[in-house]
Amino acid sequence: MKREEIADLMAFVVVAEERSFTRAAARLSMAQSALSQIVRRIEETIGIAASDANHAQRCSN
């Protein structure tokens, strides 16, 4: 796996943790639009939305 792919997956996790693109973008020091593009690409690739990942995380806690 390439470094940028790992960074993208980490960004996806931060969105799920923060439950907010705005807070996640601030935490990652990146533009919200760039973060949205990363998340959209991952969602399309793995077939799960960040909101679904967040729901699964809440259910497991």
Image (tube, rainbow, N blue to C red):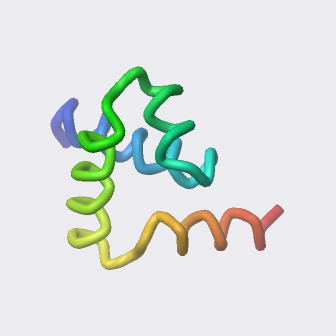
Q: In which quarter of the image is residue 7?
A: top left
Residue 44 position (above or below residue 34): below
Residue 10 position (above or below residue 47): above
| Residue at x 32% of width, y 55% of height | 39
Residue 22 position (above or below residue 3): below
| Residue at x 77% of width, y 73% of height | 59
15 lies left or right of 4 = right
Circle count: 0
Image coordinates for residue 15, horizontal then vertical, percent? 50, 48
Image coordinates for residue 58, horizontal then vertical, percent? 75, 65
7 lies left or right of 37 = right
Residue 34 position (above or below residue 46): above
Image coordinates for residue 38, horizontal then vertical, percent? 25, 49
Image coordinates for residue 11, horizontal then vertical, percent? 40, 41
Quadrant where the N terminus lies? Answer: top left
> Residue pushed farthest top?
29
Q: In which quarter of the image is residue 19?
A: bottom right
| Residue at x 44% of width, y 34% of height | 25
| Residue at x 16% of width, y 36% of height | 2
> Residue pushed farthest bottom?
47
45 lies left or right of 31 = left
Quadrant where the C terminus lies? Answer: bottom right
